[in-house]
Image: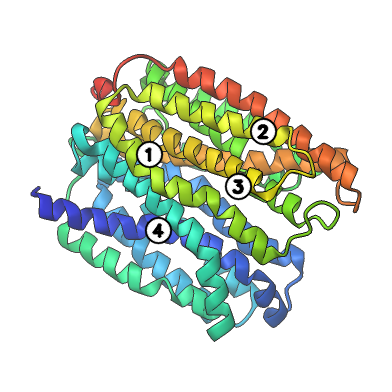
């Protein structure tokens, strides 16, 4: 493939990389308006979010496996088309249940193309430029997260919440057209096999219980659901290991130290750092601490994703030239320093100090994510890029979910829902102390993954 075609493929994939985080963050801003128009209470509005997240999370790995077998081009294109259809359903939804169904449909579609984004880029671009390309792709994801709330709020104010769902149309058309035009018809690279339907159903049931259980924490129902998901997980991996057509080839990955430790580090990074924006937002808006408006707090919180978007391409490019494991480990260490700083942050801390810590977090995330993605994709052979990409993104989603569940549990312990600044601060400091300790474990996993550049293990 020549350079021009590679660039066009990158543009197609970048549209998909932008759309998933953009829609998620933009739609969150519209929820109060949606609730008022469709008569939805807070519990119903939560389904608008969880329908998308749950369907997306449980299908990333199965679709990654299917794409390895039947080709990534078709799953990317079909996913984009269904994503468009789902958002049109949401835009013209006459009631809450149609809207929720449309969001679930959107989650299915996003898992079809998002599980293949990193796989396609890793297939099209060779080892010498993969890190840089993955870094730019990560930057585009962060841009989507950053501009989503602003554009979503603007569109809702001007033309109503339905316009937010319609705003995806141009990028879907561009991305799907370029994908149809320039994506090679076969990314399988000789991979063969069949789909283990029972194993896939088992896997999805496990994740549904885990995600819904986390959302119900710290209640008894949540604990029971998470416990059941752990039991199902043990049974799934035992059964999958004996299957002739495994969903996740345990024996293939079990001996791949680089792949296992990189994914574990990825999970811990998002577990330890994802709740930062939520917690700092509460800190800034607490009427007995900083008492800032939502708008002012939002501007301050932009510091982290903007820095992530700025530094991700550089981090990815460096991972092509130097040993990526130390770049990623250094990024986790910088993130850990930010978490420790927040765990010690006094209520009288000046706003500029909070911004500096958020910048520190953003740099840490950038220098971890891009190199780590490069390492993961370099540690497997090209015929299983789809499943590897699916596992990587699923770990990210599960880390995010567990981060917020941990936050809910600690808040419940300290009874922080009451307007008592001491209770909130205790929760705030305790959570960041827990996350800091977890990040130390993540650094250890990252450093212990093995020597060599990401591409050294490409033939595993």
Among the two numbered marks 3 and 2 on one chain, the one whose residue lies closer to the N terminus: 2
Q: Nearer the viewer, mark 1 or mark 2?
A: 2
In the picture, measured across the screen, residue 59 lies left or right of residue 53, that is left
Question: What's the residue at 65%, 35% (across, down)?
Answer: 229
> SS at mark 4?
helix
Which residue is at a point 75% across and 63% down the rendered structure image?
43
* Mark sitting on residue 183: none
Reading the image, the residue beneath label 1 is 389
Q: What crowding class fits label 3: few (fewer than 14 Cα within 10 Å), some (14-19), or many (20 or more)? A: some
Quadrant in the rendering for residue 61: top left
User: Looking at the image, is 283 positioned above or below residue 23?
Assistant: above
In the picture, measured across the screen, residue 324 lies left or right of residue 332, that is left
Marks 2 and 4, the one that precedes in the sequence: 4
Give the Cα distance between marks 3 and 4.
25 Å
Q: Which residue is mark 2?
A: 341
Numbered disc in front, either 3 or 4? 3
Secondary structure under badge 3? helix
Residue shown at 29%/64% (left/top)? 175
Going from N to C along the chain, the mark reached first, 3 or 1, is 3
Q: CA distance from mark 1 to mark 2?
A: 33 Å
* Residue on which disc 4 sits: 18
Query: Please, what secondary structure does the residue beneath circle 1 have?
Result: helix
């Amino acid at each position: 493939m020549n350079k021009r075609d590679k660039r066009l493929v990158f543009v197609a994939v970048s549209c998909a990389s932008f759309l998933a985080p953009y829609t998620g963050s933009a739609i969150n801003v519209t929820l109060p308006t949606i609730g008022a128009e469709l008569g939805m209470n807070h519990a119903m509005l939560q389904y608008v979010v969880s329908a998308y997240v749950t369907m997306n999370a449980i299908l990333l790995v199965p679709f990654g496996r299917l794409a390895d077998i039947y080709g990534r081009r078709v799953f990317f294109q079909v996913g984009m088309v269904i994503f468009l259809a789902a958002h049109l359903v949401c835009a013209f939804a006459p009631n809450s249940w149609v809207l929720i169904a449309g969001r679930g449909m959107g989650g299915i579609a996003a898992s079809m193309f998002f599980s293949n984004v990193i796989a396609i880029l890793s297939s099209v671009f060779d080892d010498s430029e993969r890190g840089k390309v993955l870094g730019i792709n990560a930057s585009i994801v962060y841009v989507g997260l950053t501009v989503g709330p602003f554009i979503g709020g603007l569109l809702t104010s001007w033309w109503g919440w339905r316009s937010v769902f319609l705003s995806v149309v141009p990028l879907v058309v561009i991305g799907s057209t370029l994908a149809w035009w320039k994506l090679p018809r076969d990314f399988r690279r000789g991979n063969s096999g069949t789909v283990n339907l029972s194993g896939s159903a088992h896997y999805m049931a496990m994740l549904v219980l885990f995600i819904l259980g986390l959302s119900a924490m710290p209640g008894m129902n949540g604990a029971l659901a998470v416990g059941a998901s752990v039991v199902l997980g043990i049974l799934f991996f035992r059964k999958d290991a004996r299957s002739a057509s495994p969903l996740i080839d345990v024996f293939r990955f079990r001996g791949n130290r680089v792949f296992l430790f990189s994914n574990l580090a990825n999970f811990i990074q998002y577990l330890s750092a994802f709740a930062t924006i939520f917690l700092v937002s509460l800190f800034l808006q607490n009427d007995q601490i900083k008492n800032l408006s939502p708008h002012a707090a939002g501007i301050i919180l932009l510091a982290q994703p903007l820095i992530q978007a700025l530094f991700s391409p550089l981090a990815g490019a460096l991972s092509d030239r130097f040993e990526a494991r130390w770049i990623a480990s250094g990024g986790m260490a910088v993130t850990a320093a930010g978490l420790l700083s927040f765990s010690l942050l006094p209520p009288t801390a000046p706003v500029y100090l909070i911004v500096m810590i958020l910048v520190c977090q953003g740099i840490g995330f950038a220098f971890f994510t891009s190199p780590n993605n490069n390492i993961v994709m370099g540690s497997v052979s090209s015929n299983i890029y789809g499943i590897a990409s699916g596992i990587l993104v699923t770990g990210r989603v599960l880390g995010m979910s567990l981060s917020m569940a941990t936050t809910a549990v600690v808040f419940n312990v300290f009874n922080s829902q009451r307007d008592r600044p001491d209770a909130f601060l205790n929760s705030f400091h305790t959570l960041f102390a827990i996350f800091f300790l977890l990040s130390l474990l993540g650094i250890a996993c990252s450093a212990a993954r093995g020597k060599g550049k990401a591409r050294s293990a490409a033939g595993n």
